[in-house]
Image: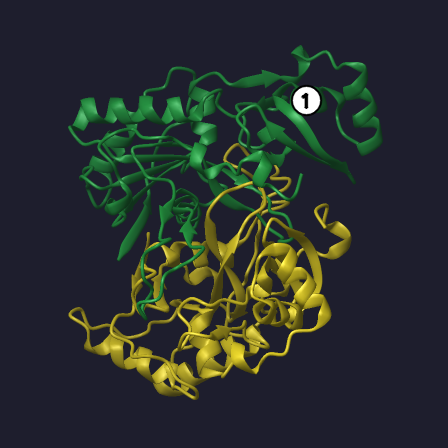
Chain colours: A green, B yellow
Amino acid sequence: MITARAVDGLPEIELGFDLAAAVVDRLASGPEPAALEPGDVLVVAHKAISKLEGRTRRLSDVEPTERARALALEHGRDPRHVQVVLDESATLIRAQRGVLIAETRHGFVCANAGVDASNAFEEGTLVLLPLDPDASARVLRARLATLTGVRPGIVITDSFGRAWRSGQCDVAIGVAGLRPLEDWRGRRDGHGRELRATIVAIADELAAAADLVRRKDSQQPVVLIRGSGRHVTAEDGPGVAPLIRARQHDLFR
Amino acid sequence: MITARAVDGLPEIELGFDLAAAVVDRLASGPEPAALEPGDVLVVAHKAISKLEGRTRRLSDVEPTERARALALEHGRDPRHVQVVLDESATLIRAQRGVLIAETRHGFVCANAGVDASNAFEEGTLVLLPLDPDASARVLRARLATLTGVRPGIVITDSFGRAWRSGQCDVAIGVAGLRPLEDWRGRRDGHGRELRATIVAIADELAAAADLVRRKDSQQPVVLIRGSGRHVTAEDGPGVAPLIRARQHDLFR
């Protein structure tokens, strides 16, 4: 059995905000008071992290290059927004029908290199992905450990579209204290036969589960998942890297 | 808050098995007895459905064609297995380094057109996707309604790999009584700004959440999710179709 509950009542998140303290406080003061327990996982929408880390850009500060202007013209986009997408991109994978699919500097392939205008501080401000989401996850984890003595697994998420399927699912972009993949290869299935190609993207499934309890029109960046403790580790571990498919194994670039 | 729990103690599933009756029975007889409630969602791994519908093939019955033999030789695969993959495919999207990515007759893009050897009845038997997973979901739903008076949302799942990301996530391949997408476009975010590109793949996120409580080495094809009732509908609805990206909007074929 797993349970997922949103942490309600978090305030507007500003630069330098102590998210760990706020989460501990809000968990303790809701209608059903709770405290972190060993094995818990906190799933955090990256926008909260980006805001407290100051990973935002004002459109009015952006001077678009020739390339950004050309792409913007071709795709009916704001050239300053396109410039920020290019700034955040390592490679542009597809540019078609107004959609820019880019590989970010972290290695994520997603629309607009993760640059987003919704839920920003204010009109005309873009929210970027954290510079190092694994480091952000480790910092949050350490602060929670200081405050509570418990080191939960941390998953930082974004909403990604998918090739071939409509709609977005939340996926992990930063991880600490959690094995992001569970590898069943070499183990036996229910009939004693060896499982051949089963590696479960646990961190992405936790991200998806958390998104189910979050309403997009509310301030609920943090979700507590209980019952997935077998994936939580004492060490901070490898972060999100195991979830990024190596370029040489990728058939869709 | 949502909860997800596996339905324990289901027997080996055979042709014609009454899965609905078994689920109702197992829910009632576990250590924490439960009954279906309005708003519940049952997430079912497709292999259980495929087995009770007889959607399996014995390798020994398969006569591979020239094309299957050539692909098998090139990719180090069993030619009979490749033949079954081709039989289940509408189009082969990629064939590279032993991996066959196909579009199934239903329109799903996945490895091996969903043809799988693990958790089959017996060695040498392949399990195919259900012929019409939405119809399978509707049949299960109707039978549950007859038995209990409750019409839960039904999601039938498979484990799909993803472009660009390692590991598999469970996704929906059949749906009944559930809105598979939640469209937030035109609604307002936490700051009153219009949400532009937010369509959440609810059925896929439910599939992923369910997979978290299932161990691959156990017989737990069915997971009960409670707390997602706002997506459950009285009508059986459009099935999985809204989750399949229209070919003309797909940048990765």
For label 1, the crowd category at 10 Å Cα-Cα, with few meaning under 14, some 14 to 19 and many 20 or more, is: many
Query: What residue did someone put label 1 on?
Result: A86
Horizontal side of A61 relative to A24 (left or right) equals right
* Residue in the picture at 69% in, 23% down: A81
The quadrant the N terminus of chain A occupies is: bottom left
Task: Indicate the position of residue B234 as horizontal and vertical percent values.
Answer: 50, 73
**Quarter residue B48 falls in:** bottom left
Three-letter amino acid code of the residue under disc 1: Leu
Which residue sits furthest front?
B73
Q: Is residue A36 visible?
A: yes
* Residue in the picture at 38% in, 81% down: B19
Residue B115 position (above or below residue A149): below
Residue B56 position (above or below residue A172): below
Residue B141 position (above or below residue B7): below
**Quarter residue A137 falls in:** top left
Badge count: 1
Task: Indicate the position of residue A112 as horizontal and vertical percent values.
Answer: 64, 31
Task: Indicate the position of residue A135 as horizontal and vertical percent values.
Answer: 38, 22
* Residue in the picture at 62% in, 62% down: B72
The quadrant the C terminus of chain A occupies is: top right
Task: Indicate the position of residue A138 as horizontal and vertical percent values.
Answer: 32, 24
